[in-house]
Structure formats: structure tokens, C-alpha cells
Image (spheres, helix red, strand yellow):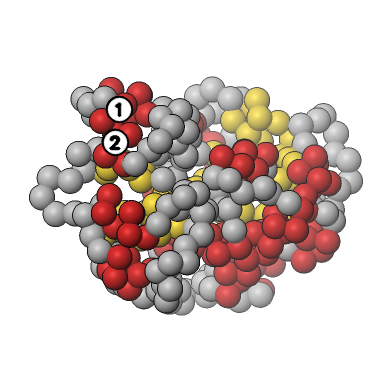
Amino acid sequence: MSYKGLDVSEFQGTVDWERVKAAGYQFAMLRAGYGFNTVDKQFHRNASECNRIGLPIGVYWFCYAVSPQTAVQEAQGCLKTISGYRLDYPVCYDIEQASVAYASGEGVTMTASLARQIVENFCNEIERNKYFAMFYTNRNFLDTYLGSGLTERYAFWYARYASSFDGTNCGIWQYTSEGSIPGVNGNVDLDTGYVDYPSVIRSAGLNYLDGSSPSPSPSPSPDPSPSYITYVIQPGDTLSGIALRYGTTTAELARLNGITDPDKIYAGNTLRVPESGGNAQYYTILPGDTLSGIAQKFGTTASALAALNGISNPNLIYAGNTIRIR
């Protein structure tokens, strides 16, 4: 038996979920977010609407991790985001070539071993919190970086755009990115499910389908204060330099991030940085952003932003980083 599904993100805009369900779609995979705790702009609405009308959903989180440690942080951001929604389908990690390109921009070479560790760490953190874990990628990425072993360990959502299925061991097959269905404006990804995940997950006692509640959402560091921004360490950064840039202290950054040796920080790792008081304003860089575009949006200049944030090359900024606007 197979199941008709679709997957959406903020790029599909406002979806009419009642029309989607009436058209015979039986499940939806919703992008919850990406990177370090960046929530998809439509996720909360999508999840609420699907829960309201009884359309089974799972979620996916796009990988911008550059180390096994940052993969765990991404999983924690995902868990925080999905808490409170009913999920009858898996919690999935989306890793593909864009993840490799991002890591390269951060000075990290994505090897097969590192890619596997990143997926394992994300999925293990999801499982540790009693959710059903899955990963998503395409055939080329699977063959180049991940190998077939991961498809035996975790549920697999397989992207291959074709008119017929090739028999790959997977639970969900994404077969087109150019679907057209009632309730969604423009193209949408369509999927075929081969596993009755609601039954499997319920039988396994996962995803809190028994009516219990997950533990309080995990935090990447022991500090409970929400008044912080995130910063991905760049090659050449020092903790004292970051502290000076954001108006805080080396000791405070070390405390907030559990750093025992302030002289040892690593490019690609993510820091929590306390927000400055007063009129400080921050912006989290999105995929496709340019420094000049951000400057125009906030009525400043690219050179001013570069100076304020210690950016040596205005043409190199990275999605997921938070920069100070003023």
C-alpha cells in the first residue's frame, strides 16, 4: 500500500490545507526550519492547520551543520520548534549539496565520514528525545557521502525525480518538485509513502502520540535566558574579538557556551552571544542574502555593516549567522 503526500516550506506561501486534504493527500512533511534555530516562516501556521483538520504531518530540518556538534545544536533547535504539535510522521534531517557548499564557505571540507557523523548526531539526538528520526537526500549525495548503511539504521526519505520508482530502500519517495495540486499556489514537491508511519510510530511509543508531553525543550547551553543571538565562528576569530564586537566579555561568552579554555574555539562552531542593551538591532542572514541587500533593507551601507561586524570580505556572508545592524 502507498500513501499520497507532499512537502512544503515558506516558499509555498499560505497553503489551503483543507483543499489539500480534500484532494486526497494523506500526509505532509513540513519544513520546520534550518541551521541553528531558524524557524520556517510558515511552519507554525502549517502545523497548526494540519493538526486542526487531522492531516498527518512530519517535519524536516535543513542541514547547515559543519560539525557533529553543530548537528546536535540543529536537532535541539528543531525539537524546540516542533514541541506542542502532533507528529504522526518522522522528524527528518535534510542534507544535500547545499549543505556541502555552506560548509565549504565556512572553511570546512565535507567528507563522507563527516557527513555521516552529522546525520547520525542529528538523528540520535532526535531519538534520544523520543521522536522517530529520518534523513533525506538524493541518489548522488547518498552514493557520494552517506552510503547505504544509514538507510538500514534510520528511516530514509529519498529524492529522485522520475516517472517510476527505482526500488531504493526508503520509506518516502519524493518524485517531483513540479507538482500542481489544489490548495497550493505554484509548484510543490510531491511524495509517495511506502510505510504506515502513524502505526509504526504509535506502536513504538514515539512522538508522544500517547498524549504525554515531551520534556522541556533542550537548550544548546545551560543558560536559560532567551536574550541571545547566535554567531558561527569564522576562521581567524578569537573569543575576545567576538566579545568586543558584540559588547560583551570573554568570560560571559565562555560561561554562556560552556567553554573551559577561551583560547580554544573552532571555526564552524556556533556561539550564543548575549544581546546588547539599548538600541542594538540584529539580523539573521538567510540563504540568498547579500550584505548590500541587507544594508538597503535597514537603511545603512554594506561598508558600515562590514565594519560593525568585523567582516573582511563583504561578498562572503553565511546563512545562519547573526549580524549586528546598529
Check disc 1 and give the amino acid type: Ser
Mark 2 burial class by Cα count in 10 Å: few <14, some 14-19, many 20+: few
Residue at 62% over, 38% down? 101
Residues under numbered marks 2 and 1 in contact, where contact means CB atoms less than 8 Å apart: yes
What percent of the width, then of the height, locates residue 160? Answer: 77, 36
Residue 26 left/right relative to 55: right
Q: Residue 313: tell me if it is visible.
A: yes
Can you give x and y, in whole percent of width and height, for residue 68 in the image?
Answer: 61, 63
Q: Amino acid at mark 2?
A: Ala
Where is residue 72 drawn, in percent x and y? 54, 64
Observer able to see residue 132? no
Q: Nearer the viewer, residue 149 or 110?
A: 110
Give the residue at x 77% y 49%: 145
Which quadrant of the view contains residue 261?
Answer: bottom left
At a point 69% along the width and 62% down the height, the residue shown is 117
Residue identifier under label 2 = 307
Q: Secondary structure at mark 1?
A: helix
Above or below, 1 relative to 291:
below
Q: Is residue 288 above or below residue 22?
A: above
Q: Nearer the viewer, residue 90 or 73?
A: 73
What residue do we see at 33% from left, 73% from top? Answer: 255
For disc 1, the marked residue is 303
Callout 2: SS: helix
Marks 2 and 1 sit apart, C-alpha to C-alpha, by 6 Å
Q: Position of residue 323 (x, y in %)?
A: 33, 42
